[in-house]
Amino acid sequence: MKRKLAGLVPAVLALALALAPLGAFAAGPKFQSATPSYTLPDTYSIIFDAAFADLTGDGRQDAVLIDLYKNELAIFKGNGDGTFQDPPSYQPVGAKPREIAVADFDKDGDLDLAISNSDSHNVSILLNRGDGTFDTQTFFAAGTYPMGLAESDFNGDGNADLAVVDTLSDQVSVLYGDGHGAFGAPVSFFCRTYSSLRRCRRLQQGRTNGSRRLQRLRFEYQRAAE
Ligand SMILES: [Ca+2]
Ligand SMILES: [Ca+2]
Ligand SMILES: [Ca+2]
């Protein structure tokens, strides 16, 4: 559903890498220059995560970048030929946004966005109007200093849920979705020890065919422990 580039990268780099042909990586660590490239206009912009999904419903992949410095998203609409419309549109999010998850949280047929905001200790939910514009964000509490973020239907009720890694408390918080774009209070699982990590693994395994999600959660655990 999306491609992600996690971590701190220069503001111009994320889309440049995204646009590089896959063949450029096949023969070794050679990078092909990617043109055009896209740059966020603010000198201090810091792209912390990126996601690629069709947010406008036209069958073309769009790009969403998190600007950690400005506490906002930049959304580049895709042209379907490897280029994007520039300038992007912007959406405010919480304090120090970290990661993006994409899913249809209100089950109306278009893709919505969830953003973990570490310094406001919550998740922003942006519901898509169907054309790549979004309703005013809604915040949901997500533990202490949330960073890593993954979506899945963890309890099998057909509604997309969120798992958030709370980096200052070494725990994973799960926010269960109601299928209308809202989420319940976070349910936390400690992951400091191996036994409690196994409990988190079982949480993931409760999802049907959830092996890929399991790997993701384990990865996030490792990041949280750094
Ligand atoms: Ca699109
Ligand atoms: Ca939706
Ligand atoms: Ca669910």
Image (cartoon, rainbow, N blue to C red):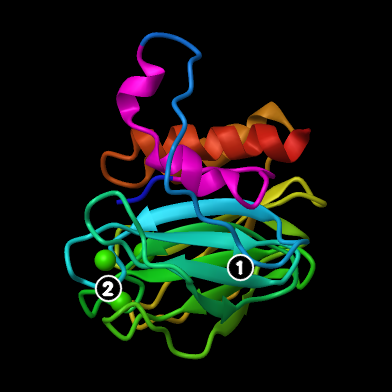
The residue under the point 17% across, 62% down is 59
Whether the residue carrying mark 2 lies under 8 Å from ligand 1 is answered with yes
Q: Is residue 151 visible?
A: no
Say which element carries label 2.
Answer: loop
Callout 1: SS? loop
Q: Verify whether residue 11 appears in magenta.
A: yes
- What range of the chain is rendered magenta? 4-26
Q: What's the residue at 33%, 40% (across, down)?
A: 210
Q: State whether residue 155 is above or below residue 87.
A: above
The x, y position of residue 187, in whole percent, is 60, 63
The residue most toward the top is 27
Relative height, residue 219 to residue 89 (above, below): above
What is the x, y in percent for residue 183? Answer: 49, 76
**Of the two numbered discs 2 and 1 in the rendering, the one whose residue sits closer to the viewer:** 2
Q: Answer with the quarter of the image where residue 146 lies.
A: bottom right
Q: Residues within 10 Å of mark 1 (few under 14, many from 20)?
A: some
Task: Name the quadrant where ligand 2 sits.
Answer: bottom left
Q: Which residue is mark 2?
A: 56
Amino acid residing under circle 1: Pro
**Pointer 2 local density, CA inside 10 Å: few below 14, some 14–19, many at least 20:** some
Tell whether position 148 is magenta: no
Answer with the quarter of the image where residue 144 lies. bottom right
Quadrant including the C terminus: top right
Q: Is 102 left, or right, of 221 in this rendering? A: left
Kindly identify which residue carries mark 1: 186
Residue 163, placed above or below residue 218: below
